[in-house]
């Protein structure tokens, strides 16, 4: 009989909320849809929490690109796996006990997308490189790994997008997302940075990036732009002019995403 696989990681709080990761899902559909057009792409939600809501929502949203997408939810907490089991419908939807070492579970079917959201925030910063490397082992060439944080309701989100290229995990984007319901301040995003950045939020060059973003928003007001969306786009363009690699493509920026094409911190 094969030896049981030891999940990599530690159990953490399982708080989640309906639609909390909506903006992450929409961003994937908007910016990376070309990755999901193959046969039965596999998406993995690592650490979906007390309820499987966000994993199931991710599946429904990505199914609009390809109805043959398969979802695997992975949890390190056995009770949370039990809670999710009524939603299984293999091979389309499955839930399994596991940790960051998802390659041990996937074996011969690597994932097109792995998302670990609001998971690493409860770990030490020193655990980040190993956790990312373990998850990357389960990615297909060209596949994405998303690691990020949100507010409890998901009103604002901040996440890193990594891609497996030539066998290596490369940082591709740092994304900030809003639903425009409030006049979000850069300081609020500074408080929900991905785990690799959160402890450096008050260090350079991270600090300066947020102050320049603030200046962009203030200048927008000075230029007579008062609507949240307009100010957001104005500030994105300002950041771009200041030399930050910001995506000023309207469908992305105007939908509430500030996308930096660099990691902002070594
Ligand atoms: C705060 S919840 C996040 C739920 C959901 N992703 C969200 O953003 O709403 C974090 C979950 O990650 C799980 N977790 C922590 N480390 C894990 C690991 N190494 N592998 C799988 N699940 C893990 C915890 O058991 C917990 O249920």
Image (cartoon, rainbow, N blue to C red):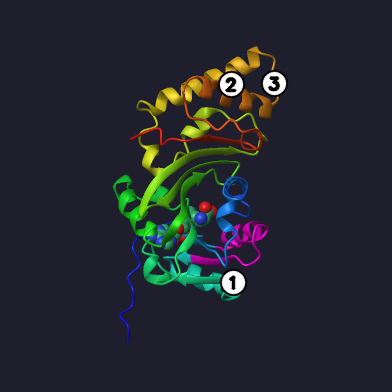
Q: Pointer 1: what residue? A: 92
The residues bearing labels 3 and 2 have C-alpha atoms spaced at a distance of 9 Å
**Can you say whether 223 is above or below 168 in the image?**
above
Q: Pointer 3: what residue? A: 226
Indicate the secondary structure of the residue bearing disc 2. helix
Residue, far top: 222
The stretch in magenta equals 51-73
> Which is nearer the N-term, disc 3 or disc 2?
2
**Marker disc for residue 145:** none
The residues bearing labels 3 and 1 have C-alpha atoms spaced at a distance of 45 Å
- Dividing the picture into quadrants, the one containing residue 66 is bottom right
The residues bearing labels 2 and 1 have C-alpha atoms spaced at a distance of 44 Å
Q: Pointer 2: what residue? A: 217
Residue, far bottom: 1
User: Mark 2, mark 1: which one is toward the viewer?
Assistant: 1
Report x, y in % for residue 17. 59, 54
């Amino acid at each position: 009989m094969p030896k049981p696989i030891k999940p990599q990681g530690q159990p953490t709080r399982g708080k989640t909320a309906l639609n909390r990761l909506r903006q992450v899902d929409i961003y994937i559909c908007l910016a990376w849809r070309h990755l999901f057009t193959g046969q039965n792409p596999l998406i993995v939600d690592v650490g979906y929490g007390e309820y499987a809501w966000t994993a199931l929502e991710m599946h429904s949203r990505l199914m609009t690109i390809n109805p043959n997408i398969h979802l695997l939810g992975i949890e390190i907490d056995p009770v949370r796996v039990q809670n999710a089991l009524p939603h299984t419908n293999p091979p389309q939807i499955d839930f399994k006990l596991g940790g960051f070492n998802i390659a041990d579970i996937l074996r011969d079917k690597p994932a097109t997308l792995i998302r670990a959201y609001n998971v690493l925030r409860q770990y030490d910063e020193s655990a980040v490189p190993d956790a990312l490397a373990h998850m990357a082992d389960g990615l297909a060439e060209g596949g994405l790994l998303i690691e990020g944080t949100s507010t409890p309701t998901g009103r604002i989100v901040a996440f890193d997008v990594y891609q497996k290229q030539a066998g290596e995990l490369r940082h591709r984007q740092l994304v900030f997302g809003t639903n425009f319901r409030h006049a979000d301040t850069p300081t609020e995003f500074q408080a929900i940075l991905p785990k690799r950045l959160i402890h450096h939020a008050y260090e350079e060059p991270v600090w300066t990036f947020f102050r320049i973003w603030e200046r962009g928003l203030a200048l927008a007001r000075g230029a007579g732009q008062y609507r949240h969306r307009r100010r957001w786009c104005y500030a994105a363009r300002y950041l771009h002019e200041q030399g930050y690699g910001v995506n000023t493509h309207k469908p992305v920026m105007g939908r509430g995403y500030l996308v930096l094409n660099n990691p902002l911190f070594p």
